Image (cartoon, rainbow, N blue to C red):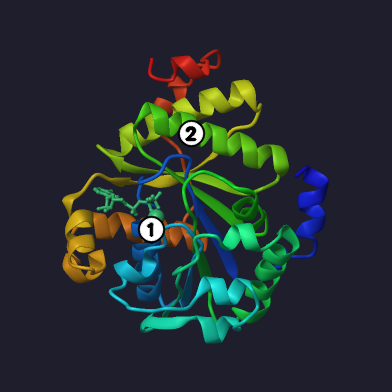
Amino acid sequence: MNRLQLKQATNAVRRKENKIISVLSGKGGVGKSVIVNNLADVLTHLGKRVLIIDADVNFGNQHILANLSVDYGFRQFATGQLSLKESSIEISKNISLIASVNSISLFDEIDIPTIAECMNRIRREATEYDVVLIDHSSGVNKHASVMAYASDMVLTVLVPELTSISDSYGLFKYLHDINPQLECRFLVNRAAQSDEAEYIYSKLCAVAERFVESVPKYFGFLSESDDFRKAVASQQTISESNPNSSAFKELNVLAHKLLGSARTSFTNNSFKRINKTTAVADIKG
Ligand SMILES: Nc1ncnc2c1ncn2[C@@H]1O[C@H](COP(=O)(O)OP(=O)(O)OP(=O)(O)O)[C@@H](O)[C@H]1O
Ligand SMILES: [Mg+2]
């Protein structure tokens, strides 16, 4: 699929009534689903209504995180069998979920115009929600890139590991090649502290500047915290399992950024460490 085909497929999709955010990653297991689950929760604390769409057709687990048993959702919505309202289920006050169950071959069954129309329908039918969070599988495929392209923002999650930085660069390059205007921001998860997150981001920038000639935008970070493991194990959100945790405070910062009420700033000195001549193989240097 070239850029023109993708643009045609998603033509007229982008309007601004609600904020649609696609959460992606290059590498798997970096925390996308748990972040979506908790960001949705924190956003409701800020008075917002949130729709989570689990577009991880292979191994969707938003319903597991929400401790729900459900046998319909994204497949029925994407194929047009059910409306957005009919395919979603309320998981808590002000959060609804379109779950991904029995969807493994879904992206083999529906074509690009269908997934583009699916995004149009989300715009039209999700007007009661302030924010729509789409949880994707790791890596990238044509269907996910159409969904990303039709979103207002792509949030890419990475962790402080060489392979994660490298895969994030690959994902950024892929998305940037399709649409250089795409609002793509990076969230460093499992950081030892904010300095490390900014350092990892600076490494990503160094590679991107050299090969894509564009600087990826920083979104923020979450620290490595046992609170995530405990919350997942008990199928709770961080606000339920440990509302006084720093994880909850950091999630609040991210939720405010997402709503645009806090500027995404990048002030740390580590930015100076960007080495414009760094090549992919030198990322760990
Ligand atoms: N900041 C963190 N600190 C500690 N553990 C974390 C943190 N973020 C996520 N985790 C842990 O990482 C595990 C994997 O997270 P998750 O399933 O959300 O990743 P994912 O990116 O959605 O994976 P996949 O690519 O398979 O969909 C979770 O069980 C969670 O406990
Ligand atoms: Mg996941």
Residue 279 image offset from top left, x and y in percent: 52, 15
> What amino acid type should be assigned to the residue bearing mark 2?
Asp
Does residue 243 sit above or below 149 in this rendering?
below
Between residues 228 and 217, which one lies in front from this camera angle?
A: 228
Label pair 1/2, CB-CB below 8 angstroms: no
Q: Dividing the image into 4 quarters, which one contains the C terminus?
A: top left
Question: Residue at coordinates 36% horizontally, 38% vertically from top-left?
Answer: 159
Residue 248 image offset from top left, x and y in percent: 26, 60
Disc 2 crowd rating (10 Å Cα; few below 14, some 14-19, many 20+) is some
Does residue 221 sit above or below 123 in this rendering?
above
The answer to whether the beta carbon of the residue marked 2 is less than 8 Å from any atom of ligand 1 is no
> What amino acid type should be assigned to the residue bearing mark 1?
Ser
Question: Residue at coordinates 45% horizontally, 38% vertically from top-left?
Answer: 266
The mark that comes first in sequence, 1 or 2, is 1
The answer to whether the beta carbon of the residue marked 1 is less than 8 Å from any atom of ligand 2 is yes
Please indicate whether residue 251 sits to the left or right of residue 52 in the image: left
Q: What element carries label 2?
A: helix
Residue 244 image offset from top left, x and y in percent: 17, 63
Compute the Cα span from label 1 to label 2: 18 Å
- Res. 89 image quadrant: bottom left
Does residue 157 sit above or below 152 in this rendering?
above
Q: Which residue lies furthest to the bottom in this view?
A: 86
Residue 285 in view: yes
Please name the residue that numbered disc 2 is placed on. 167
